[in-house]
Amino acid sequence: MAGDTLAQKIIARAAGLTHVAVGDDVTVRVDLLMAHDGSGPRRWRPRMEALGAPLWDPDKVVLVTDHYVPAEDQVAADILQETRDFARDYGVQKFFDMEGICHAILPEKGLLKPGMFVAGGDSHTTMGGAYACYAAGFGATDTTGIAITGETWTTVPETILVQLNGQLNFAVTAKDIMLRLCRELGMDNSFKVIEYTGSGVANMAMAERTVLSNMAAELGAETGLIGVDGVTIDALAATGVDTAGAEAWASDADAQYSKCFTLGASGLEPQIAAPHSPVNSDDIGHFIGTQVDQCYIGACVGAKLTDLHMAAAVLRGRQVAPGTRLVVAPSTAFTMQAALADGTLRILEDAGATFLPSGCGACAGFGGRALGDGDVCLSTTNRNFKGRMGHANSRVYLGSAYAAAAAAVTGEITDPRDFLDANRTAA
Amino acid sequence: MRVKGRAWVFGDAINTDLLAPGYAMTLPPKELAQHCLEAVNPDFAREVRPGDVVVAGDNFGLGSSREQAAISLHTLGVGAVLARSFARIFYRNAINIGLPALSFDAVDEIADGAALDLDLAEGWLKRGGDTFALKPLPPHIRDLIAAGGLMAQLHEKMAKQRQAEGSDA
Ligand code: SF4
């Protein structure tokens, strides 16, 4: 018998079985349920009350406010209040109110442990896959069911292996890899898992790895897994997670994959995805000179401390072009603090950036932060569907934080390497 | 389970921002549903009738986990969604609220406005004189749709549990 993929191992454990085969329908016990102000209590409570059901285990539930913070109007204020009331009434201790974006909060608070089955009320829950968690997004009825029973069903998925070989070039990032993969693999990999491996992953820092897992959602996958190695162990240890036995959470050498896709990291150029889909990606050279009104550095995927560092490397001693807006929403309050402490915020502020509070900010067009009619935005977020960031006639390009900062300086899409010194800046 | 109505044909990659636009997400379900698919077909929400069938290409419902994408279609009375393939969260959401989502290879043969007649239990679709076979649903999904969705199923389960506990006492 062939070995098991990491996905099979996690699902088997969560299902209380020694082995599962691809295609098996199984019931799994969920180790962690996460939801935010948009997807959680406001959807759960009415249904739970109608059933007269309590939470199955308040200790296994994490609630975060990020989509509607801070309240822009009465409706948003009510949604936030419902979330707070629920956390109090149902005894949820792991409640993080206005501390940052849910997917960034989970690892920051040391809540992810390799081998966990994590259900999240948000499509980018996949981000936890970088910690070898089977972390998948679910809709509100599914999460309500889990909140009540602690269980859900899944069909054991095939795994597509993405092999990243070699080293990324200077100023090329995990974001560029994912935009490229959206074009190469398409967004229709539903009911499949993506697993990343190869020397390009082995040498990649944890923050960048989470980008691979986060944007597995754009590929349509269940989750985006990376097996545990030394980098994972160090990152977990830094947040106080017990790592005993964690190495076991990796695919067997003879595991079966439905498909293997190889990407040479060393040949990759910085990428830009044109409106209105991440699959419209190509080398940045094809987009040079495209005018932008706003550059946005935000979201779970694109406003980590490392992204702010990338932006600062471009913006140090430079100014945002007149008539162009640079909007920055650090992903968590902790990130904001760290960027303040190391001088990064100062560089961005001196360049003329406007800051939004930590949270989902302008990523999904919620609240009063939407793009206007005809606005063109270069964004570090993960998807650029028509109307996502606001007006149906706004146009969103996707790129790395280097690319967003460079466009902010010139008012048009610009190769960030024009502003960077390869000898001084580490990616 | 029988569904009868007109076909509304859409292309590939109909995403959740099209089905339930972010800017309208705080509206009550009925009003939000009025914005469903407005960016691709401004007449759809106004003119769709109960029992009508949405027919689409690949990867229907990709994007966010927002259940309002499926709820909006359900609210407008859509009787079933047929697509060559579905995004997983949308698929689960649809089944969970009792909106039949069926993968169907011959979507190209269905013209916009065609009169359709589907029987989910027997697994066929009729259009005029033509009959197409529908793929059988896995048992746990058939049970979910038959129960009227996950909440209705849980309700049943819990009622049974309470009864059992009551009779023990
Ligand atoms: S930042 Fe954007 S992609 Fe990330 S959770 Fe928030 S809305 Fe979703």
Image (cartoon, coloured by chain):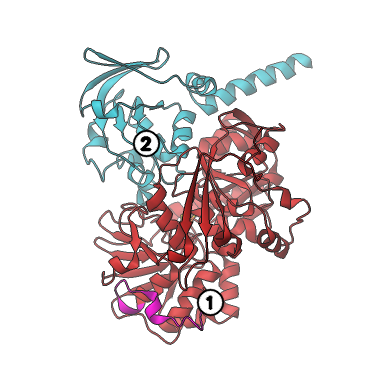
Chain colours: A red, B cyan
Write down the residue under mark 2: B72
View extreme (bottom): residue: A317
Q: Give x and y (percent) for residue A32.
A: 65, 45
Residue A413 painted magenta: yes
Relative placement, left or right, of A273 versus A257 is left
Relative placement, left or right, of B59 versus A39 is left
User: In front: B124, or A390?
Assistant: B124
Prevailing SS of the magenta stretch:
loop
From this viewpoint, is residue A309 visible? yes
Residue A388 painted magenta: no
- Which residue is pictured at 65% across the width and 18% down the height? B160
Q: Give x and y (percent) for residue A238.
A: 71, 65
Write down the residue under mark 1: A426
Q: Is residue A394 above or below residue A217?
A: below
Q: What's under tag 2, amino acid-wise?
A: Ser
Q: Is residue A309 above or below residue A369?
A: below
**Protein chain holding label 2:** B
User: In front: A289, or B161?
Assistant: A289
Marks 2 and 1, how far apart in space?
47 Å
Please report the bounds of the magenta region as a residue range. A409-426
User: In front: B89, or B152?
Assistant: B89
- Which residue is pictured at 21% across the width and 37% down the height? B43
- Which residue is pictured at 64% across the width and 37% down the height? A11
- Other-residue count near label 2 (Cα within 10 Å), few / some / many at <14 / 14–19 / ≥20: many
Q: What's under tag 1, amino acid-wise?
A: Ala
Residue A130 sits in quarter: bottom right
Q: Give x and y (percent) for residue A19.
A: 68, 32
- Which residue is pictured at 39% across the width and 71% down the height? A403
Q: Give x and y (percent) for residue A154.
A: 57, 33
Could you tell me which secondary element the residue under label 1 belongs to? loop
